[in-house]
Amino acid sequence: VTILGLESSCDDTAAAILRQTDESPPEILASIVYGQSELHARFGGVVPEIAARAHAEKLDLCVEEALAVAGLSLRDIDAIAVTAGPGLIGGVLSGVMCAKGLAAGLGLPLIGVNHLAGHALTPRLTDGAAYPYLMLLVSGGHCQFLIARGADSFTRLGGTIDDAPGEAFDKTARLLGLPQPGGPSVQAEATKGDARRFRFPRPLLDRPGCDMSFSGLKTALLRARDTILSEKGGLTRQDRADLCASFQAAVVDVLAAKTARAVTIYVEQTPAHPLLAVAGGVAANSAIRARLETVCTDLGVAFTAPPLELCTDNAAMIAYAGLELFHAGHRDDMALVARPRWPLDQAAAALLGSGK
Ligand code: ATP
Ligand code: FE
């Protein structure tokens, strides 16, 4: 099967082509990502209207480029997978419209994919991870522990009760005048800083379960910055690096502590060959990856993290999730809708579906 995947739920326009022949693992023939960061740079965050328009303009180009890289034409494609949510509604709509056009025009099956399932299934694409496995999905808009049992079957063990870590990285960068997206720039600064200079909060560690909170961290960072500003009138390079290092250390500590708990809960339920996989944009952070690996080694659990370019948004993960759904017999039609909210956990999705 050769499947084309489209992704446009946030600020990356992406198209990818995946091929799977009988017994062999899926092969990424092309994975094209057009980032929009320059378009949004002067606004200090993603502007939904600008994003939607840019996706609409760039999607065709992305598809053409993916075909060219793969050395294929549209006639070689067997199915179309597209992110149908969650995300910024305008962007998701752009992708769904483009996918519907291609599917209708070529007479191909259409498969709507949950963006979060794309992230959560990435370890199966990259490492052939077998179900079930424990997933820490940590990204720009999400942070949760999931048990992945199938392409359409996830159980949430816990997660953030307020902000996502990616959001906190981006906010930190904004407060310190560093470029967006904040994750990579804060990580780079953090390597030059002293993580012990500021003692930022590590909330909920004394609470049972694996829920997390990151909103207090943002406020603490803002206060620390303002204290320096009022005392010295400006931030030195070292101040900035120390703030980043202290911030990142707090995120790493919280994620590590809660991961240890989630792994313990998971192992009690599913003792055979337990695996923790991490995915999502924040999983590209090297300090986080290293620390989670240590946590898993200490607990005797296998650990895997996708290559960096498959952590942040891409269409290969959407094509892959689409492929699994395709094999499971899942098909959508022209009634496929864009869903701005779409939880992965069935219980949560059912609640949302019933309008509660
Ligand atoms: P979601 O997947 O929750 O809908 P999204 O698609 O916008 O959100 P991703 O592309 O998965 O998010 O991740 C983007 C986030 O990852 C951004 O907040 C970015 O700052 C963060 N990020 C990227 N690289 C790093 C890094 N090295 N360290 C920390 N954070 C990072
Ligand atoms: Fe994402």
Image: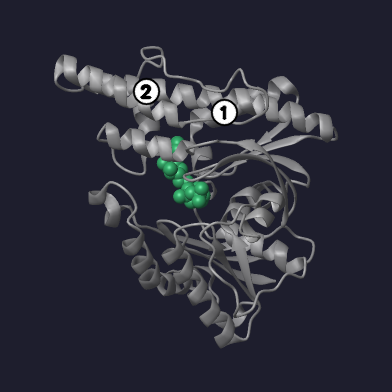
Q: Earlier in the sequence, mark 1 or mark 2?
A: 2
Q: Residue furthest right?
A: 272
**Which residue is pictured at 24% across the width and 35% down the height?**
177
Structural distance between the alpha carbons of marks 1 and 2: 18 Å
- Asked if residue 201 shows in the view, the reply is yes
Question: Where does residue 341 sit, x and y in percent of width and height?
Answer: 54, 56
Give amino acid for label 2. Answer: Ala
Identify the mark at residue 350; answer none if there is no mark.
none
- Asked if residue 309 shows in the view, the reply is no
Residue 134 located left or right of residue 222 = right
Up/down of 156 relative to 16, above or below: above
Residue 69 located left or right of residue 222 = right
Image quarter (top left, top right, bottom left or bottom right) of the C terminus: bottom right
Q: Residue furthest front?
A: 356
Give amino acid for label 1. Answer: Leu
Question: Where does residue 53 sit, x and y in percent of width and height?
Answer: 34, 68
Residue at which label 2 appears:
220
Q: Residues within 10 Å of mark 2 (few under 14, many from 20)?
A: some
Near-viewer residue (114 or 193):
114
Near-viewer residue (163 or 145):
163
Q: Secondary structure at mark 2?
A: helix
Colour mapping used in the image: one colour
Near-viewer residue (152 or 282):
152
Identify the mark at residue 255; answer none if there is no mark.
1
Question: Where does residue 144 sit, x and y in percent of width and height?
Answer: 60, 39
